[in-house]
Amino acid sequence: MRIGILGLGRIGAFHAETLSGLDAVDSLVLTDPFADAAKAAAERFGADVVDSPEALLAAGVDGIVVAAATDAHPALILAGVEAGVPVFCEKPVARTMAEGVEVLKAVAGRHVPIQIGYNRRFDTGFVNARAAVQSGGLGKLHTVRSTTLDPAPPPAAYIAASGGIFRDCSVHDFDIIRWVTGREVREVYAVGGNRGAEYIKEAGDADTTGAILTLDDGTIAVVSNSRHNARGYDVRMEIHGFEDSIAVGLEDKLPLRSVEPGVTFPAGTPHDFFMDRFTAAYRAELTAFTEVVAGTRPSPCTIEDALEAGWIADACTLSLHEHRPVTIEEVRQA
C-alpha cells in the first residue's frame, strides 16, 4: 500500500522510518511546510515529495499519517475523510475539546476509519496487563498506579503551546488506565507544583503533578507525572486486585536504582527517551494502521477514545486551578 505522511518533524520522520520498514507498505508520499524536512526524509527513505496536503491526497495514497502541528489536526483529519482515505493522527484530535467534539460530529456517519495515536495500547507490557485484567485472574481491582516521568522538560515554546502537562503528558496515563481497566473515570482531584524550570511556571503550568482518579466501579487510580526525572524516561503501571498484583515497566532499563543491600535490579542502562522506551510499540501501532487501511481490523483507538482521555485531562486541569474535586460530567457539560 501507499501511505502519505503529513508533517516531517521528529515524530513524522520517525513514523516514516517505521513505515518504510513494514512489509505492507510499498511506497511513501511526504509533505511538510518546511520543504527541506520533507526532502531530507524522502532522500533517506526513497519516498516521493509533494508540496501540499491536497497534492498528497491526490497522489494515490491508501492511507495518511498526520504528524503535523496540533492546530492542523482537525483540517487534515477532515481532508482525509472527505477524500475517503483512512487516517492515522497523532494525539490530540484538536487543541481544545470543543474543537475535538466538532471533528467528531463532522466525521460521524462517514465510515472512513480514523485511528488516534496512543502508542501505549501497543506496548507488550500494557497489552499483557489488559489481558490479565480481562481474564479475571487479578480479582476485583482496588488500586491502579500510573507514572510518566520525563528526563527533562521540553523547550519553553513547546510548553507554551502544549495545553498544559495534563493535556500533553498525563493524557497518556489517562488513556491507558481506561484501556487496561476497561472502566471510565468518574471524578478527579489533582495537585501540582513547580520546583524546576521557571519558564513552565511562567506559562501557568506545573512541572510535577499528582492526580487521584475515581473509576466508575470505585477503583482508585493514582497518576504521577513530572518534567524532571534526571535518571531517565520512566513509564510504569501497577494494577492491584484482591487476588493478585502486576506491574508494567519493571525491567532492567527502568530508570530507578535500589538502595537495598545486595539488590542489583535494575541492571541495565535506563531509558532516556520516549522513542527508546516505545520503539516496538510504535511499530505495532503503525502495523495496526496498515490493517485498518486494508480493512482487516477496526480502528484500535477512535476519536471517541481520544476525547474521553481529553475530558479527564480537562477535569484535572480545572481541579488543579480550583483546588477541588471535579467530575467528568462537569467538564463535559461546560
Image: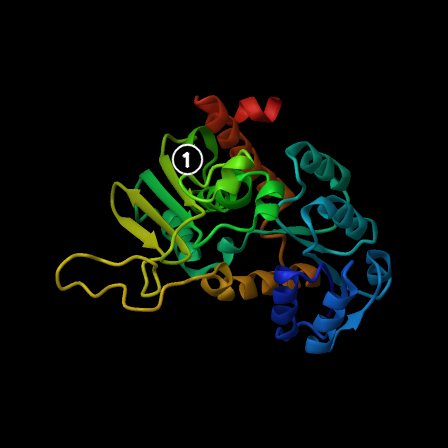
Q: Residue shown at 76%/50% (left/top)?
A: 76
Answer above or below: position of 53 versus 305.
below
Q: How is the image coloured?
A: rainbow
Residue 301 on image: x %, y %: 59, 49
Residue 275 seen anywhere in this rendered image of the structure: yes
Q: Left or right of 219: which side holds 98? A: right
Q: Residue furthest left?
A: 261
Dot 1 falls on a residue whose secondary structure is strand
**Residue 165 showing in the rendered view:** no
Residue 334, position in %: x, y?
62, 22
The residue that mark 1 highlights is: 193
Residue at image point 32% right, 69% down: 268
Q: Position of residue 279 (x, y in %)?
A: 50, 65
Numbered label tally: 1
Residue 73, placed above or below residue 30: above
Is the residue 188 above or below the residue 306 in the image? above
Point out residue 286 in the picture as x, y percentages from the top left corner: 61, 63
Picture quadrant of residue 323: top left
Name the quarter where the N terminus is drawn. bottom right
Residue lying at the far front in this picture: please name it.
198
Q: Quick one: 150 or 241, which is closer to the camera?
A: 150
Answer left or right for 251 relative to 12: left
Question: At label 1, which amino acid type do we have?
Answer: Gly
Q: Quadrant of residue 56?
A: bottom right
Q: Residue at x 47, y 61 (%)?
A: 273
119 left or right of 87 in image: left
* Front one among 186 and 211: 211
Crowd tier of the residue under label 1, counting other residues whose Cα lies within 10 Å: few below 14, some 14–19, many 20 or above:
some
Question: Compared to 118, does 266 lie above or below?
Answer: below
